[in-house]
Image: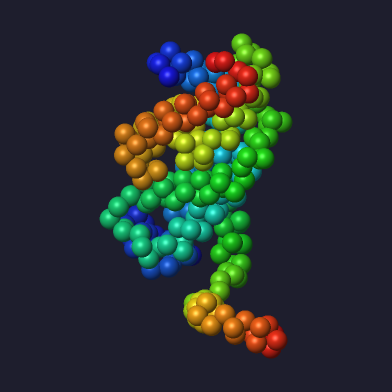
């Protein structure tokens, strides 16, 4: 395997289709991409598949990548799109596996039924709103990073979060829950 | 919806869906490069552009000459 020393060289070689350079980038960024995706889809197994899917899209789009720009930011944007596509096709019957090992259990201050209904209503939101609300409210990611990953302005992220909350409230009311 | 409503729903959401980082973690537990290599080696299923062009041409032809549909079906 060719040892690539300089990141700039790696990016140039990646753009030319060099698989070794792609491997270097993959190993350097797979953890970060996985971490971002798992925050959105909340399912480790699906996040692993989507990480591979993201890098597959990255490899196919290599000719369009500008080596002078941040590979990480580009990868995160593609990862966000892959996660969005997953939410669009997997919802709403796909629930977050509830038997996952839990380091912190849901807040015991609310009933299990209320928790389940809220989570279910949230997963039925339009995927674009769901992603913005998940990253902003649940994962508490900076609005600037969310905006960059979604390819929209921070103002637009705030609008999506507000619309998500409003729709969630409406859906909860429909289910007889007055938050 | 006022600010109090918004705040209450945000709190309810946070209590119902705790952050992934506190639930399952956001650390990758295995190297995904072997899976990536498999994906790279898999033959891509793609329809050549010519097939799409041919399909579009046939669809356009049938749209202009619907009388040709029975003839086409007969020959299929």
Q: Residue at x 49, y 15 (%)?
A: B8
Q: Residue furthest top?
A: A109
Q: In this view, does B63 lie above or below B18?
A: below
Q: How many labels does the image show?
A: 0
Give the colour scheme shown.
Answer: rainbow
Q: Residue at x 31, y 39 (%)?
A: A153
Of residue B64 and residue A134, the one placed in the foreground of this image is B64
Any part of residue A87 in sight: yes
Any part of residue A135 in sight: no
Q: Which residue is drawn at 28% across and 55% down?
A: A68
Q: Which residue is drawn at 56% across and 74% down?
A: B47
Position in image of residue A108 (x %, y %): 64, 13
Q: Residue B30 vs residue A5: left or right? A: right
Of residue B42 and residue A41, the one placed in the foreground of this image is A41
Where is residue A162, by image quadrant?
Answer: top left
Image quadrant occupied by the C terminus of chain A: top right
Q: In this view, does A163 lie above or below A108?
A: below
Position in image of residue A86 (x %, y %): 56, 47
Position in image of residue B37 (x %, y %): 58, 61
Q: Is residue B52 above or below residue B72?
A: above
Q: Residue furthest left?
A: A68
Position in image of residue A30 (x %, y %): 50, 48
Of residue B59 and residue A55, the one placed in the foreground of this image is B59
């Amino acid at each position: 395997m060719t040892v690539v020393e300089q990141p700039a060289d790696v990016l140039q070689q990646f753009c030319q289709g060099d698989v070794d350079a792609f491997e270097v980038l993959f190993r350097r960024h797979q953890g970060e991409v996985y971490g971002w995706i798992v925050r959105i889809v909340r399912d480790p197994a699906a996040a692993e598949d989507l990480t591979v899917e993201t890098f597959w899209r990255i490899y196919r789009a290599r000719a369009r990548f500008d080596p002078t720009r941040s590979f990480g930011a580009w990868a995160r944007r593609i990862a966000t799109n892959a996660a969005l596509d997953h939410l669009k096709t997997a919802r709403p019957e796909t629930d977050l596996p509830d038997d996952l090992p839990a380091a912190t259990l849901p807040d015991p201050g609310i009933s299990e039924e209320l928790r389940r209904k809220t989570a279910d209503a949230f997963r039925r939101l339009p995927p674009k709103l769901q992603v913005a609300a998940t990253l902003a409210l649940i994962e508490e990611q900076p609005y600037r990073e969310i905006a960059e990953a979604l390819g929209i302005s921070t103002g637009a992220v705030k609008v999506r979060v507000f619309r998500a909350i409003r729709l969630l409230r409406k859906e909860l009311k429909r289910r007889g829950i007055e938050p | 919806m006022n600010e109090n409503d918004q705040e209450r729903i945000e709190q309810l959401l946070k209590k119902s869906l705790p952050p992934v980082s506190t639930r399952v973690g956001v650390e990758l537990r295995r190297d995904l490069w072997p899976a990536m290599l498999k994906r790279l080696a898999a033959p891509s299923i793609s329809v050549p552009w010519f097939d799409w062009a041919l399909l579009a041409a046939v669809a356009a032809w049938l749209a202009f000459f619907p009388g040709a549909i029975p003839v086409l079906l007969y020959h299929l």
